[in-house]
Amino acid sequence: MLSKKLEKALNDQMEMESYASFLYLSMASWFDSAGMEGCSQFMFRQSEEEKEHMLRLYHYILEMDGKAIIPGIKQPPSKFKSAVEIFKSVYVHEQKVTKSINNLVDLSNKENDHATFNFLQWYIAEQMEEEALMRSILDRINLIGGGPQSLYYIDKEIEMINQAEAAKEAAEKA
Ligand code: FEO
């Protein structure tokens, strides 16, 4: 059984994952309008992933006889400055999520809740992967530079990364 404090913290995390899902969906929409189909598909897949992160928490809370509170939708921004700014802000957002997961792990330790501590290890590994992915995207964008066709090359690069990530996910689920 979950303590009230942990139940609330896990519900707060559900809200954070759900906001990330809508934020990334909004970014996917922006990229689509900008004609950057590769980036749009990448952000759409990231959005779906965040929804899965939210649902994983939902199922865990119920399994532990807690109450999962479905979060309200806070409207994410719909206007963004540029493709580069979007990827930078995704990286910053992922760092915030990592901090929040770390706080949850600390709380589960403090409350001697080994099941929740164990459950959260998956998120620790996932956050390491997400942060590394965003760093590698920012490195590649840097390498491409700001030439006249840079947006085209960024889009192609992200399209390839998206295909590789989708194949990795499919292999994990098989
Ligand atoms: Fe579920 Fe990318 O944080």
Image: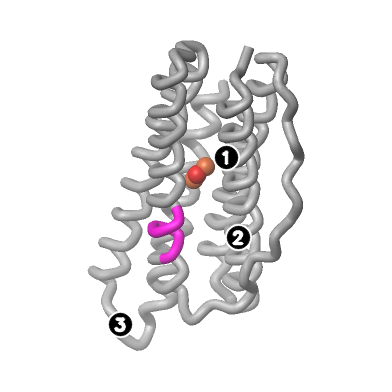
Name the image quarter holding the C terminus. Answer: top right
Task: Report helix, strand or loop for mark 3.
Answer: loop
Q: Residue at left 64%, top 65%?
A: 76
Which label's residue is closer to the chain start, 3 or 1?
1
Going by the numbered disc 3, the residue's amino acid type is Gly
Question: Label 1 belongs to which residue?
Answer: 13
Going by the numbered disc 1, the residue's amino acid type is Gln
Whole-percent x, y for residue 69 in the image: 75, 36
Which label's residue is closer to the chain start, 1 or 2?
1
Q: How is the image coloured?
A: one colour
The relative height of residue 55 versus residue 36 in the rendered view (above or below) is above
Whole-percent x, y for residue 33 in the image: 64, 77
**Residue 109: quadrant of the picture:** top left
Whole-percent x, y for residue 36 in the image: 54, 71
Question: Label 3 belongs to which residue?
Answer: 146
Q: CA distance from mark 3 to mark 1?
A: 37 Å
Question: Label 2 belongs to which residue?
Answer: 23
Q: CA distance from mark 1 to mark 2?
A: 15 Å
Q: CA distance from mark 2 to mark 3?
A: 26 Å
